[in-house]
Image: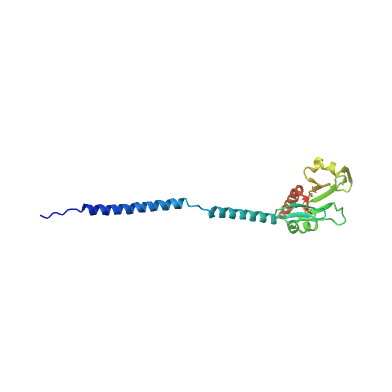
Amino acid sequence: MVKFYKNIHGFSIITLILGMVVLILLVLSGWYIYRTAHEPKTNAPIKTLSTNKTKSQTQQTSTTSSKTYFTIPQWGVRAPYSGSLTLEYSVPSGSDPSTTNLSSAQLDASDPNCKNNPKYGGMFERFPASDIVINPNKNSSGVTSQNSSSQANHGNNWIKIGNYYYWYIPVKGFCGSTKSSELAQMQTIYALGSILTSLQPIPQ
């Protein structure tokens, strides 16, 4: 009978080579994973911060440039206004220049009578602190603007800028006969009454 003997030395060499190949692959894989995980990312954070900063500056510039004001150049004052109404003012013909009639384009469009009577948004009045206040009936009130501002009937509807006191006087009654014109008038009165305390000098 013929016997076959296993080549023990050959088997050991092949096993050794395969083991070395596997070991080398494991080392290379480990090195690649380590390098990928610890590779410095210098560009990403800087780019993100730069993008956010630019966006913030753009929004700030956009907000500043779109800010609108309700301005009365004859008095040298203005108030920031961001509402949806187009506010208007006019100086009554032959009247004291310390009084302005107030309205809005929306109120004018709501009823012909509202357009023909441009005071249904109320009135702004301005008097020096030492002047005697004139009542709506054109009679003297006997008190100065400074003293009149502290009276209860004025409430918070006044502001002092420089040496002048400013008041907002709402009008009584509706100029139109429809619900839409009444709503437009109430919105106009609210908008103009709200911006009084925001009046400020126009920058020179």
**Number of marks present in the image shown:** 0
Say which quadrant the N terminus sits in.
bottom left
Q: Residue at position x 23%, y 52% from top?
A: 9
Q: Residue placed farthest to the left in the image?
A: 1
Q: Nearer the viewer, residue 179 or 146?
A: 146
Q: Residue at x 21, y 52 (%)?
A: 8
Q: Is residue 124 visible?
A: yes
Pinpoint residue 52: horizontal percent, then vertical percent: 59, 53
Q: Position of residue 188 (x, y in %)?
A: 74, 52
Q: Is residue 177 visible?
A: no
Q: Is residue 23 left or right of residue 139?
A: left
| Residue 115, quarter of the rendered image | bottom right
Query: Foreground residue, 155 or 117?
Result: 155
Of residues 69 and 50, the one nearer the viewer is 50
Q: Specify the color scheme.
A: rainbow
Q: Left or right? Give the position of 136 relative to 54.
A: right
The percent position of residue 35, horizontal first and vertical second, equals 45, 52
Task: Name which residue lies at 56% across and 53% down.
Answer: 46
| Position of residue 120 measured from the top left corner of the image (x, y, whole percent) | 78, 53
Judge whether 62 appears above or below 132 on screen.
below
Quarter of the image that includes the C terminus: bottom right
Q: Residue at x 83, y 49 (%)?
A: 126
